[in-house]
Amino acid sequence: PPPQPGHPQMGQPYRQDPQSGGVEDQDADVVAGASGGIGQPLSLLLKASPLVDHLSLYDVVNTPGVTADLSHISSIAQIDGYLPADNGMAKAFKNADIVIIPAGIPRKPGMTRDDLFKINAGIVQGLIEGIADNAPDAFILVISNPVNSTVPIAAEVLKKKGKFNPKKLFGVTTLDVVRAETFVQQLTGTKDPSKTRIPVIGGHSGETIVPLFSKAEPSVNIPADKLDALTNRVQFGGDEVVKAKDGAGSATLSMAYAGFRFAEQVIKAARGETGIVEPTFVYLPGVTGGDEIAKETGLEYFSVPVELGKDGAQKAHNIVKEANDYEKKLLQKAYEGLKGNIEKGVEFVHNPP
Ligand code: NAD
Ligand code: LMR
C-alpha cells in the first residue's frame, strides 16, 4: 500500500514517541548516511551514549527502519529519522549541533579511495549545502572518502555560501590512530592498546598517512627491522579490510568505533571539557597555529593533533617539526600525494565537471 500521511516516506519524521511532539529543531546530533555500513553502528553508539540527547538520522534509503529499531533502546536520546522526500534533509539538519557524514560509496578490491571521488564528491557537496542552509553553526565531521578531497570540497562549498567556519570542519582520520594503537601492541605487548597514544598525521590514504611512532605516549621501542612493515600496515590498513570483505565494502565497524570516539571528544569539548587533543584533518589557515604548519608542509589541509574547545578547533599543534628523519621522509611523500588530492577537491567546486 502507498505510504499513509504520517509515514516517514511522506517526509514526516519517525519519532520515538509519536505523542510526545516534535523534537526536530532541537540541537540534534545528525548522522548523514545513517542507513549504511558505517551509519548504522555509528548511530547505535550515539543512541547508546549518555552524551547524546537528540539523534537525527538522514539517508536516501531505510531511515524509517533504522530509526524505529534504534528508538526501542532505553537510552536518553530522542530519535527521529528522515528520507529526502518533503524536505527531509532540511528537517534532519535544522539547527543541528553536529553533523557526521558517512554517506557515499565504499571501495571494492582493486580501487583506490580516489576512485570514489566521482560519486562521493557530489554527495558530499549536496549534504554540505544542506548544512550551510540549515545548520551553519554545526560541527561537521566528514568520514566520506576520499577524505583528502571531500574536506576541501566541504570548505569550498561553505565558503561559497559565506558559511565557512574552519574551526568546525573536521576530516575524521581517527581510524588511522586506532589502527596504529592496535598494530603497535603486537610489538609492545601492552594489555590495553588504547592506552598508547600515537599521533598519525597527514591525510587519509596510503602514503599520505604518516604515523609518528617516535611521538608515542608512553614511548614505544620499535625494532628498526619492524618499522617499515608496521608503518606500511597503518598506511594500508584500509586495504586489508577491503580485501577481506571481498567486494562487500570497506571498514564499517572499526570506523563506527573511530567516528564515535572522535565525535565524543568533539561533544565533550563543546560542553567545556578542556585538554582534549585529537589528530584531525583541518583547514590550516583557519586554525590558530595552522599557518606555521601550512608553511612547513606547503599545504592548506593537513591532519595534526588539534586541541578542541567549546568553539571547535582551538589550536593546531605543529608536530611536523618534531618528526625524526625516518618520519620526515614519509612526510615528503605525503605532501606530494596530498597536494593533488586537495587541488582536485577545490577544483571540483569551482569548475564542476
Ligand atoms: P555504505 O554504502 O554501506 O553506506 C553509505 C550510505 O550512504 C548508504 O546508506 C547510502 O544510502 C547513503 N547515501 C548515499 N548518498 C547519500 C546522500 N546523498 N545523502 C545521504 N545518504 C546517502 O558505505 P560505508 O561502508 O558506510 O562507507 C561510507 C563512506 O565512508 C565511504 O565513502 C567510505 O569510503 C568511507 N569510509 C571512510 C573512513 C575514514 O576513515 N574516514 C573509513 C571507512 C569508510
Ligand atoms: C579505511 O581506511 O578503512 C577507509 O578509508 C575505507 C577504505 O576505503 O579503506
Image (cartoon, rainbow, N blue to C red):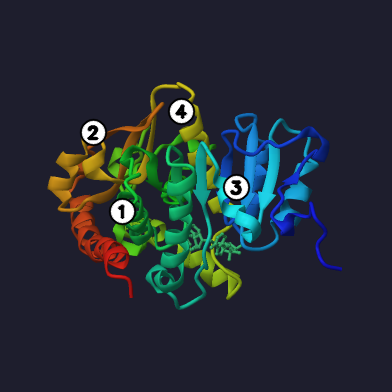
State the image coordinates of residue 100 (x, y, percent, origin top left). 51, 47
Quadrant housing the C terminus = bottom left
Circle 3 is placed at which residue position?
92
Indicate which label's residue lies in the foreground, 4 or 3. 3
Quarter of image, res 316: top left
Marker count (numbered): 4
User: First in sequence: mark 1 or mark 4?
Assistant: 1
Please indicate whether residue 124 sits to the left or right of residue 284 in the image: right
Q: Report the residue marked by disc 4.
A: 270
Residue 261 position (above or below residue 60): above
Q: CA distance from mark 2 to mark 4?
A: 17 Å
* Numbered label attached to residue 160: 1
Asked whether 9 or 105 is in front, the reply is 9
Q: Which residue is mark 2?
A: 288
Give the spatial CA distance, label 1 vs label 4.
26 Å
Residue ID at (64%, 31%): 53
Q: Secondary structure at mark 1?
A: helix
Q: Is mark 4 within 8 Å of ligand 1?
A: no
- Residue 338, image x, y percentages: 26, 60
Q: Comparing marks 1 and 4, which lies closer to the viewer?
A: 1
